[in-house]
Amino acid sequence: MIPIHDSHPSYSKPVVTILLIGANVLAFLFLLSLDPFTRNDFIAVFGMVPDRFHVTSLLTSMFLHGGWMHLIGNMLFLWVFGDNIEDILGSWKFLLFYLLCGVAAAGGQYFINPDSRVPMIGASGAIAGVMGAYLLKFPHSRISMIGWFVIIFTFELPAWVVLLYWFGIQFLSGVGSIADVTGEKGGTAFFAHVGGFLAGMALIFLFKTRDPYRLRRDLLW
């Protein structure tokens, strides 16, 4: 199941959301321009590698992706959920919120497996924070989903169902991945998703949010 649209309108332009999507796409295109050896070396340096942790990699790692589907999936989730959170925070606070969620997500994965030598890359931890905030602020929004079983079909679910289901899958998958104590198998950093989601739920209370209905009234006047 993949979210493709939400029913809650935004009353301001999601400038930072668009810029973040653009930055991720440009970073991915740059990676594609490199030969395989240089690309792997670049990811090893700028991805977050717990075994040789570097503070700057907390930020650089969240703008790197391992493939087209990795990139497209993350950017779709950011587009569906990011505009509404940017709407209630304002652009600059949303950018700070997003980056802090990404840092917390990387920290969550580091805490679980500090000895891993596999680079962790991707925006999904930061986007998970956006989703956690969305769960608290817009739980009854309707999320349009696309699914497939023999045929492709669309349907709607309440946001709280979609987001709690997603979080549950990440948590259970993360618990199942703990058996890989070395972290050398790679794969999905599930506890980065868990950490980012919980960070988003906590941080949204620390950031003063704007009333989107007031924004709509001001625009009409």
Image (cartoon, rainbow, N blue to C red):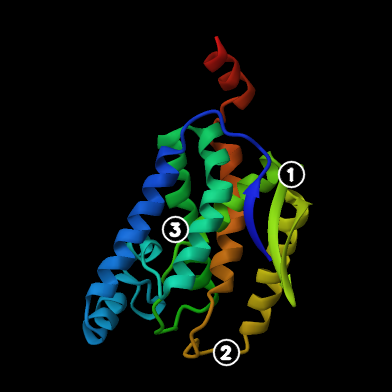
Q: Amino acid at mark 3?
A: Val
The residue that mark 2 highlights is 180
Q: Residue 92's spot in the image, x, y percent?
A: 40, 36
Residue at 56% in and 40% down: 85
Around disc 3, counting alpha carbons within 10 Å, would you say few (fewer than 14), some (14 to 19), or many (20 or more)?
A: many
The residue positioned farthest toward the top in the image shown: 221
Dot 2 or dot 1, earlier in sequence: 1
Q: Residue 48's spot in the image, x, y percent?
A: 38, 71
Residue 21 appears in view: yes
Around disc 1, counting alpha carbons within 10 Å, would you say few (fewer than 14), some (14 to 19), or many (20 or more)?
A: some
- Which mark lies nearer to you, 2 or 1? 1
User: Distance of mark 3 from mark 2, alpha carbons?
Assistant: 23 Å
Helix, strand or loop under label 2:
loop
Q: Residue 207's spot in the image, x, y percent?
A: 53, 35
Around disc 2, counting alpha carbons within 10 Å, would you say few (fewer than 14), some (14 to 19), or many (20 or more)?
A: few
Q: Residue 42's spot in the image, x, y percent?
A: 25, 76
Task: Determine which of the numbered discs, if any, sits on residue 103 in the image.
Answer: 3
Residue 105 appears in view: no
Q: Amino acid at mark 1?
A: Pro
Q: Amino acid at mark 2?
A: Asp
User: Distance of mark 2 from mark 1, alpha carbons?
Assistant: 34 Å
Q: Up-down: is 49 above or below 196? A: below
Q: Up-down: is 210 above or below 140? A: above
**Cβ atoms under marks 3 and 2 closer than 8 Å:** no
Task: Determine which of the numbered discs, if any, sits on residue 139 in the image.
Answer: 1
